[in-house]
Amino acid sequence: MAMLIIYNYWFLYIPYLIWLYFDWQTPEKGGRRSDWVKSWTVWRYFKDYFPIHLIKTQELDPGHNYIFGFHPHGILVPGAFGNFCTNYSDFKKLFPGFTAYLHVTSCWFRCPFFREYLMSLGPVSVSKKSISHVLSEARGGNISVIVVGGAKESLEAHPGKYNLFISQRKGFVKIALTHGASLVPVISFGENDLFKQINNPEGSWLRTVQYRVKKLTGLALPLLYARGLFQYSFGLMPYRKPIHAIVGRPIPVQRTLHPTPEQTEQLHQTYMEELRKLFDEHKGKYGIPEHQTLVFK
């Protein structure tokens, strides 16, 4: 966009800016996905590179809407993207009659041109308005996939650790109550093993800078590294580590148009308990030591 303006290609950027003005709210109204883009062969290679797996533990009713709470964020959330934004995952086979909407930070939809590409793959805004739009489908069959820890949690994405920013994240619970959408915890084993990052403990100068950048831009900037294209010692390509996203048991939610703080807190505690149970039930299958536990922050 900058190059078009600098070189005065007004006949390209003026029509696009007009289009952008009228299309600005689309990411909050279900987006604009393209089955063609979601079926590009590159996404099959993407899924098989790690590889990425989706495992269902309970049947879901396509007559209802659901919120999938996805944990952990990891660095780039490839488990959520590969399973819910491409046509090469087992999502349609495991959950027939459902449409998944991956909610991502709204700042991505402020990027000209890139927003069109991103929406074509299915992601929509993580704003309250956007989630409410998805969950307002009267016939059911919609799934809002929310990476609860957000970009901040990527700064905790160190191999072998499962630190989740969830203790103060209650907005998704309140939205579930107002819409009567069942909550489903999803734990993605291997998500934190794809990259290493420079040590950045809480209170360090690096973490302080990263938090300031996050506050200014909405994006966290972990200083990451992994493997190279033709060697394994250093580079920016993720390691080939399997990702297993386990979809847990749905938590029934009674619709409450004006939930009290006590109701929100109670459901939030129930959700965290179910998430911990899901992790403990399946961790042994995916190489997680028995003593390893989730750490809620």
Image (cartoon, helix red, strand yellow):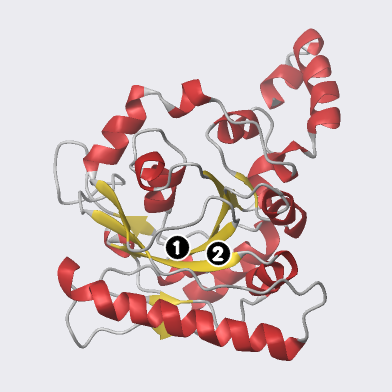
Indicate the amino acid at tag 1.
His
Residue 16 location in percent, x, y?
77, 20
- Which quadrant of the structure image shows residue 243? bottom left
- Element type at mark 2: helix
Is residue 103 at least partly visible in the picture?
yes
Give the mark nearer the N terminus: 1 vs 2.
Answer: 1
- Is 114 drawn above or below residue 250 in the view shown? above
Determine whether, in the image, residue 48 is placed left or right of residue 59.
left
- Is 262 drawn above or below residue 214 in the view shown? below
Q: Specify the farthest residue to the bottom.
A: 262
Residue 25 location in percent, x, y?
79, 40
Residue that label 2 marks: 150
- Element type at mark 1: loop
Of 192 and 202, which appears nearest the observer? 192
Determine whether, in the image, residue 59 is placed left or right of residue 112.
left
Q: Which mark is residue 35?
A: none
Residue 240 location in percent, x, y?
20, 49
Is residue 287 at least partly visible in the picture?
no
Of 173 and 179, which appears nearest the observer? 179
Of 268 and 114, which appears nearest the observer? 268
Look at 50% across and 77% down and name the residue there.
205
Asked if the residue under mark 2 is in contact with the one under mark 1, i.e. CB atoms within 8 Å, the reply is: yes
Residue 55 location in percent, x, y?
30, 56
- Which quadrant of the structure image shows residue 146? bottom right
- Which quadrant of the structure image shows residue 192? bottom left
Residue that label 1 marks: 73
Indicate the amino acid at tag 2.
Gly
Q: Quadrant of the N terminus?
A: top right
Look at 50% across and 59% down and name the residue there.
221
